[in-house]
Amino acid sequence: MTQSSRRLGTAALAGLPASVSQPGYDRDAVATGIVHLGIGAFHRAHQAVCTDDVLAAGDLRWGIIGTSLRSPDTRDALVPQDGLYTLSVRDSDGEALRVIGAVRDVLVAPESPAALLDVMCRPSVAIVSLTVTEKGYCHDPATGRLDESHPDIVHDLAHPEAPRSAIGILARAIARRRAEGLTPFTPLCCDNLPANGRTLHRILSRFAALVSPDLGAYVEGEIACPETMVDRIVPATTDEDRGRIAAALGVEDAWPIVTEPFLQWVIEDRFLSGRPAWEAAGATLVSEVAPYETMKLRLLNGSHSSLAYLGYLSGCETVAAAMAEPGIAAFVEALMEDSTPTLTLPPGADVAGYRRSLIDRFRNTALKHRTWQIAMDGTQKLPQRLLGTVRDRLARGLPIDRHALGVAAWMRYVAGTDEAGKPIDVRDPLAADLAAIARAAGPVAERLAPALLGVRAVFGDDLPGQPQFRAAVARALDALYRDGAKATAAAYARLEG
């Protein structure tokens, strides 16, 4: 170990510097109330932190058992540390370190689906939360419905006792708990899906009905999936982060998490078997999440994705670096302005203040949030981040040029070569299909744009046939090839909205 011969864990807590916050409760007395599917960086910077606050307030029913659905990396990092990890909150004023203790254990689902299902069927488990990314729901993003041809869904229907997908795991655990006479848990989606609770319920109900009509009717009628909206910027942890944090702690942490001070969590208060008092940890419990969700998806996420593609193409490695380019920054502000008329705002919302806060967050140079990281999985993200706004502006007779540039920047990106001629490592469920389309069309906007608009999983059946949209995307893509991302963004920032 580079910084210390010791590893973070229960035995190391007493020796940490006084400036490092740590769990102020008896971790041995914590029960398992939550199973989390997809225990990645975002969950550990967001929901786990709020739950840690609840535990610290004395309600010890809500310990988390996390599950990785693919890789053992998180388990291998955290289990030797007794589930402990460091949260680094960074901004221009400095860094605050806190050890989080809410995670009791980490499982790896492919190694033993049975062990995971056994945990999910413990009577104490009241919530199964998910951050499995958009692609983890095995659905068609354009329609929000289950993709019944998805390989994991096909497998899980054939082998329900050993499911691979989050949907198959949920359905099997729900069926087992029902058979064993246990109160059902509440599935809680914490991913950026449109109407994420209703979307999860629709997908899960359909899968369950394919297992058996009786199970489908039970899920449809008895299982509640609350809506949520989550927001916190969480860059990928770097070796530099690990080294800096280890030096501050005096012990090694295999996987610390770095994030910003801002945290938002809006939750529909509809739980079957109780919940933590997350409102005491800063969450907002509401009867309707949709206005908050739409504001966040269209102002933050839509701008973030557009910024990432434009920034990456022009050689900016991080969000903050892209925002330091005047033309890109001006475009992002103008894009938010264009999105605002499509919103139904939450009560008392200060949309102008929210937009200003987003710009400040994007400019946070203490966070090394890579444009490449945000650019991943664009086929899953574009429908809710940009295309819903396009449809709404078209319906109102409003210009769509700036949102078309965001789409065109994605097209230029997935074509696989940046403006310096360097290959792009495109990470996307449809990466092979996108690459084949780009090769056949070549770097010519009038061929590439209509070819990529034909990807129905992204654009549906309506937008490819919309002349105004087709023309706007082709025009923007041509400008990107001709003038480059920085100049095109600056020009589009000056357009009439």
Image (cartoon, rainbow, N blue to C red):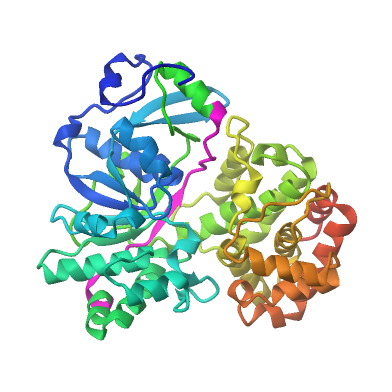
User: How many numbered marks have been drawn onto this rendered protein structure?
Assistant: 0
Give the quarter of the image for residue 320. top right
Question: For this view, does 130 lie left or right of residue 149?
Answer: left
Q: Does 193 sit above or below residue 299?
A: below
What residue sits 61% from the left and 71% below the top?
458
Q: Return the residue nearer the eye: 364 or 409.
A: 409
**Residue 30: image location, x then y, percent:** 17, 38
What residue sits 60% from the left and 78% below the top?
460
Residue 270 shows in the view: no
View extreme (right): residue: 482
**Residue 452: image location, x then y, percent:** 72, 72
What residue sits 47% from the left and 57% below the top?
133
Q: Does 118 sit above or below residue 97?
A: below
Q: Does 376 sit above or below residue 319?
A: below
Q: Does 7 sit above or below residue 374?
A: above
**Residue 272: image location, x then y, percent:** 20, 62
Which residues are drawn in magenta?
Answer: 220-240
View extreme (bottom): residue: 213
**Residue 482: image location, x then y, percent:** 90, 57
Q: Return the residue nearer the eye: 196 or 369.
A: 369
Question: For this view, does 266 lie left or right of residue 352?
Answer: left
Give the quarter of the image for residue 442. bottom right
Question: For this view, does 314 lie left or right of residue 53?
Answer: right
What residue sits 84% from the left and 64% below the top?
443
On whether residue 65 falls in the magenta region, the answer is no
